[in-house]
Amino acid sequence: MNYLNYAGEAFLLIPLSAIFLNNICNKRFIEKHFHILTGAVALLQMIAAVFAFYIMDANQMLNFDFSVFGSSKITGIELFDINPVSLVFLFCIGMVAFVSVMISIRTIDVKKGSYVNLLMTLLIGMNGMVMVSDLFSLYVFLDVIGISSFVMIAMFRSRKGLEGSIKYLIISEIASIFILMGLSFISMKTGSLSFKDIGRNLLTNTFELQTILIYAAIILMIAGFSIKAGIVPFHSWLPDAHQSADTSISVLLSGIVIKIAGIYGIYVLTNIFGGIKAYQVSLAGLGIISVVVGALLAACQSHFKRIVAYSSVSQMGYILLGLSTGSTLGIVGAVAHVFSHAAFKSTLFTNAAAIHEQTGTLEIDEMGGLQSRMPVTAFSSTIAFLSTAGIPPFAGFWSKLLIVMALWGSGNQILAGFALCASILTSAYFLRLQKKVFFGKTPEHLSSVTEVTGSIKFAEILLTAVTCIVGVLFPLIIIFLHSRGLI
Amino acid sequence: MFNSIGEFLCHGANLIIFMVALPAICGILLWLFQKQYIVKLVIAILSSVTNLIFALGLSLHNEFFTRVPYAPFEFEFLFRVYDLCALFIVIAAVVFVLITLYTVIYSKKKHYGGLYLLYLYISFAMVNGALLSDSLGSMLFFWEGLLFPLFGILLIKNNNNPKTAVKTLTLVGLSDLLLMLGIIITSHTAGTQNLSEIENLAISGNGMLGFICIMLGALGMSGCMPFHSWIPNASDDSPTVFMVAFPGALQVILGVYLALRTVLDIYGFVPGSGISIIIMALGSVTLVFAAAMMLIQNDIKRLISYCAISQLGFLVMGIGSGLTDGIVGGLHSLIDYVFYITGLFMISGIIEKQFGTKDLRQLSGLLKRIPATMVCFIIFLLSVVGFPGFNGFLSKELIFNASLKTNVIFYICALLGTFLTALSFLRMGMSLFFEKKNAPSEIKKESKSSVGMLIPVVILSSLCIGIYSQNGLVEYALGIGKIAGVTFALIVLFAAAVLLAVFDYIYGYKKSGNALNCANHIIYAPGIKRVYKSAEKGYFDPYNWLIALVGGFSDICVRMEHGVSWVYDKAVPGMVNKVGLALHRFDNGRLSRYLYLVIGGLVFITFVFIIIK
Amino acid sequence: MATIIYISLAFLLIFCVMAVMSHSLLKSAIYLALASATLGVILYVLGAYWAAVIEVSVCSGLITVIFISAISLSKIKKEEVQKLYSDKKRMWFLPVMLIVVGVALIVLALANDLSLTNTAEKVTEDFREIFWNTRQADIIGQIVTILIGGIAVFVLFRDDEDKK
């Protein structure tokens, strides 16, 4: 138990100490070695998550409560708790943060100290969000994530960056307002917002006004978290934010922030309200609309990162579909898709960074024939695309399969069919992207382009390996889950 | 002597070696020696005479069977030599001697001579094999084997315009396919492939299908309708020697042989039954149509081709009647046909070679120039019409008998055919033999008429003379006793038809002043003129129908393909693009738009909740 | 009690709308101060004394002071800002709609005699205990938020020496 305690505390304290370290060290030193610091933090997070998962599984524990600065003995209330799902999320956070650091080595040239600071605060925010056991704390950490990601987008003060970040800020604040309203309506009934107190019998013993208020709360919270997750029709901020931010920050945004801020929130809601039919239907509706509209919008973009951003919108729809089924299989599928989406989306953004580094542009109409010149990038891009489209044996295939199976099993066969057909749309826009960027004729101004080197290449290879290995070994994971009685 | 030869042949594989392989080897030899004329001549004469001797030996021997194992999979050739088969072998051998002689002499200077002789001999070997075989499978093997030399010959002259070759192959191939189908059905129904074991299958159900297929296949090979249209085309495009050998002799022998076997042995053919009427109708249509087409031809070879088709129709009528008279008449008719059609083609070849043209309008006064040839010509023509004193008379009368007994309509058709044939022969003959008023005065006499080419013609024509000449042979072959004689009344009617033709000719001649235009009053009669025009254009040609059908079918397929690719290439991506662009334009980058969307989403979720709750 | 709450809510709404829509930065800051003061009143009436105090002192007082000093220190002239916005059309229907909706809701609440039953019981503990024990997670979050604020100011508003 001590190990778990240390692990849990580590998730919050290590980034804090990293901030501390960053600010007391010499500026030049940080400029040269910032990646070591941040990379170490991310790696530690990943290791701690795996470690904790292993221990929890070995001891057959389902969750573990702890408090930082250990004062649980006084009030008997545990403030944080980790369970296997949150450990998966924590691992994803670490992985994407690691990739972001890899990219930032090459793409960020100034303000590296501030980047470290902001990344660490973001990490604290995200770690905190998946570990709290209280809705209001969830809201607080949500705000942390919101503000730090806003600052990260606006960090370099380009005209487009500021515009994108202001849009993101306003819409994100609206989301926070919605969530807060929902929270307050719920607390009017129960008086406390802790998960234990809310439970599933929120709707019993209510009179009419309260029932309406509870439903209003659910609606508002769904809307709020959907805004954060980038679900259609709340998605409009996503492409602008992604396009205007630096690539290492886009990775964070798309790879993990929208998932933690949005999807994890909806996961929490599903745990509480998942049995309500209207809830499931609205989630399913939002999900399928996201899948289709995201794919359609991605098909006619001309900026690499915008296409990838809309692809995120589409994939969030899939996760929502998985969560809407209300069955364990659906939740497992959704969490698996969170992981595989983190992997392949990070790959795509790494490729974007590589292309931007080497060619200086991200407009796909200006590119072509890069496959012969940047083979590693092309290969990892192809693997990522195949994983997105749900083609075996990559990780994306398995998670999509679980989601579709969950949909089918819960009676939504039509939706399952739609989700499968949308895979064709996914392939369509990605094929277009691949063709325009990597295949075809090379324009003259790109004839001297060479393969990207260094950390970005390393990140690409690493992520591709992760996608392939997880994909190939996924049946083992399924066996494991089956033995634990989840599937 | 013949007996011993026959004895010799029926041992082991001797039959196949000497009757089938030997001609093929001689063909190869001839091809190798294609430049040496004398050598070719000697080999040709030797090989064909040897073949004749073998054939005679076989025919005089008793009936026997052999089997020759061919391949390790129990595929073997079954041969049976008996009366009918022997008769056909002998006929084929006789005519082959004459054909080879003619061919060698005709193709003396032609460059394709060697290759052509090779193909000819191979075809003859195949014919021999088919005639001798006892099982349907081996017959089919040899039958199909005939197709390849046929195609090869057609391609010799026209390598870059193989239209005729394609047409021939299509039509003959189609008839072969029908034959295959018929053979499969027959052997399936009978349970065995051996012809000697199949007796009198019933013509009903499967049997009907099998019978029709075999008959169509066999007769189609010979050139009966609807597989006839390649013969006139071939007469334009292919060498004369081809016309002499194939449509004139070999194909007809083979086709009629199988038709006879089918009618006599394999199926129980009832005279006057529905199927018999159908076959007779087929024959009579062929007869009348081809004879009518004869009337407007200006090209000698085309005219003779149509004559051949028409006489084949006559023959089919005879066989189709199923009566003894008809069958005997048909077999007689076959023997006559082989002789006179081959002879007619040979003569047309001689004329073309000597005068450089085969157009009736340019040839005239030949009686004075090549008298001997022309005398033979006259003999052939009279034989075709069926004049008493020539061999065609008996066969025609027997067939008239049979057709009258079946139905009077068929008899009228036969008379009509005779009338038209006579008229067109009068037209052709008169314009060829005598000087025309406005013909070109000088016809080039390009080469001396070769005596050698004349010899086979003379022999053939002599074979055409003589009444009751093959009487004994046919009846013996068919195992029939005495046949009924010819009816006097029919002879009168026949004479009347011929006289009518003569009067019509004189009338036409007087009217138009020209031998060639003597039939114009018939041709240009209203209604008939249209029919002739469309016939010449090829509207009645089943091959053209087939091509149009195939063209139409492939057109449909192309359209379907376009439709499917339109869906995949244009419709779906276009729709996706349009929708995507519309959605894209909806997002104008302004915050206010985003906020409206947010409100809209909220309203949507509320809506869902209201509806479900 | 309810009357005061409803009137304060109405004022709150009006002040917020005017804060957002006014053309002058200074006036916006002042409206914001007034709005948070009203909010403080509401909080006090609802019984959250500590919250009311902190609200009024921090937001109405401290934040407003910072805003006004920042606006005074900034180099942009107020007149220029006003000119920038004076020729833009006002969307007047939005605030009108808000006000109308607000008034309607108030009338609705009065008509249905909504009572605020089933609220949580009043908190009687010392707020220090609340802060540190029961709401420790929030405190950590708040600390980090303040940290981010500082970093943000540093990143967004400080001129870099590298920029030439």
Image (cartoon, coloured by chain):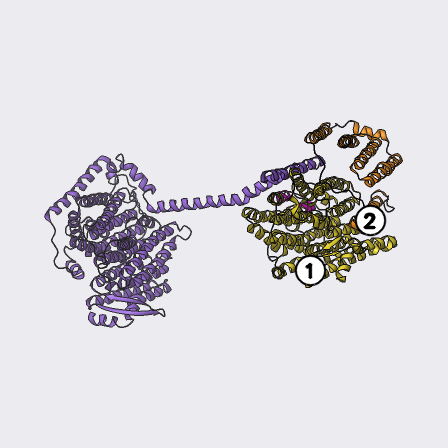
Chain colours: A yellow, B purple, C orange
Q: Is the magenta stretch mostly helix, strand or loop?
A: helix
Q: Type of residue at label 1? A: Met
The chain letter under disc 2 is C
Q: Is mark 2 on a helix, strand or loop?
A: helix
Label 1 crowding class (10 Å Cα cut-off): few <14, some 14-19, many 20+? few
Q: For the C terminus of chain B, which image quadrant?
A: top right
Q: Is mark 1 on a helix, strand or loop?
A: loop
Q: Classify residue B611 by image quadrant.
A: top right
Q: Classify residue B54 by image quadrant.
A: bottom left
Determine whether A72 is above or below B492 in the image. below
Is A135 on the left or on the right of A292, as rendered?
A: right
Q: Position of residue A195 (x, y in %)?
A: 70, 49
Q: Mark 1 points at which residue?
A: A61
Q: Residue C129 carries which label?
A: 2
Judge by depth and name the residue closer to the eye, B323 or A484.
Answer: A484
Q: Position of residue C154 (x, y in %)?
A: 85, 45
Q: Type of residue at label 2? A: Glu
Q: For the N terminus of chain B, which image quadrant?
A: bottom left
Is A140 on the left or on the right of C76, as rendered?
A: left
Judge by depth and name the residue closer to the eye, B82 or B308.
Answer: B82
| Residues shaded magenta | A292-311
Q: Position of residue B102 (x, y in %)?
A: 28, 58
Judge by depth and name the residue closer to the eye, B437 or A417.
Answer: A417
